[in-house]
Amino acid sequence: MLDDLTEDGLLDGRVRLCQPARGYRVAIDPVLLAAAVPVRAGERILDAGAGSGAASLCLAARVPDCRLVGLELERELARLASHNVALNGLERRIDMMAGDLGRPPPRLSGSSFDHVMTNPPFLAAGSGTPSPEPGRQRAHREGEVELVGWLAGCLRLLRPGGHLTLIQRAERLGEVLSALQGKAGDLVVFPLWPAAERRAAKRVLVQGRKGARGLLRLMRGLVLHEVDGRFTPAAERILRHGAALPLADRPVTDPPASDRPASDHHG
């Protein structure tokens, strides 16, 4: 087990998470990823690149009757994820295992998951300045499996018609769409805007269905912060209260119809 851990809370304390005190530490990305998966009770989900298990734990908290498998390359992190599963009393619903997405463990051979969610490394191999923290370096930078291969591995473990949901840097959106072309359709691109003022989106959520042929849709996305740095009410509902983030439906940033001024209604 990794040394020098802290125990933290997600979803306003509903999820307990032990994680390394130094190196890669969970922020909001896995919480948003888990909220975006359109899972229903009884379905099976693969968390590809599960890390310490944050996304799996958040999804299990939101949808009580789903079942999850987490796959993590780093054996120490996979053991830590299993510890976190036990810490939250979810051993019967979440199975964490160590393994390579490019060469999945035999237990996953031929698996057909209803959903695959993934938070791939953001940085291409050889790009940017390497982090002095080995854990952060491994989490943020691609290793042997590049982004195209990572997404191909996800699709192999997904049943036909199943949903792939991922979060990635906005600057790599072109690579994501190219990797999914001809393999997944009904694609939805959902920007995550850092603030209400006009600033470029740094992250995007992307979702598609394996083998589908529907057209790509660009949604309005979610504004994360107010001008003063606080989370917006829409972001608070997801990050603190565990609300779902439906990518393909009406954006969560829209106010309820009853709250809109009359001038917003047309026709």
Image: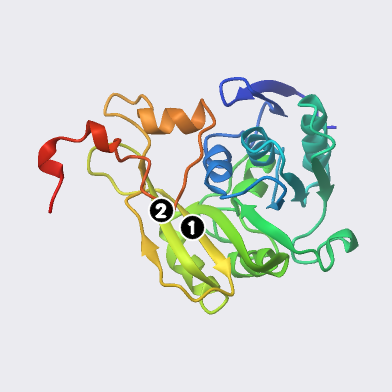
* Residue 199 image offset from top left, x and y in percent: 27, 44
Q: Quadrant of residue 248?
A: bottom left
Nearer-the-camera pick, 68 or 55:
68
Location of mark 1 (residue): 206
What residue lies at 43% left-to-right and 28% top-to-bottom? Answer: 236
What residue is rendered at 39% in x and 48% in y? 202
Q: Residue furthest front?
A: 267
* The C terminus lies in quadrant: bottom left
Q: What's the mark number on residue 50?
A: none
Q: Is residue 89 above or below residue 260?
A: above
Q: Are marks 2 and 1 in contact (CB under 8 Å)?
A: yes
For the residues labelled 2 and 1, the Cα–Cα distance comes to 6 Å
Q: Amino acid at mark 1?
A: Val
Q: Which mark is residue 190?
A: 2
Marks 2 and 1, the one that precedes in the sequence: 2
> Which secondary structure, mark 2?
strand
Q: How far across and down, in percent of the image, does residue 21 sit? A: 68, 26
**Image coords of residue 186 (percent x, y):** 47, 67
The residue tagged with tag 1: helix, strand or loop? strand
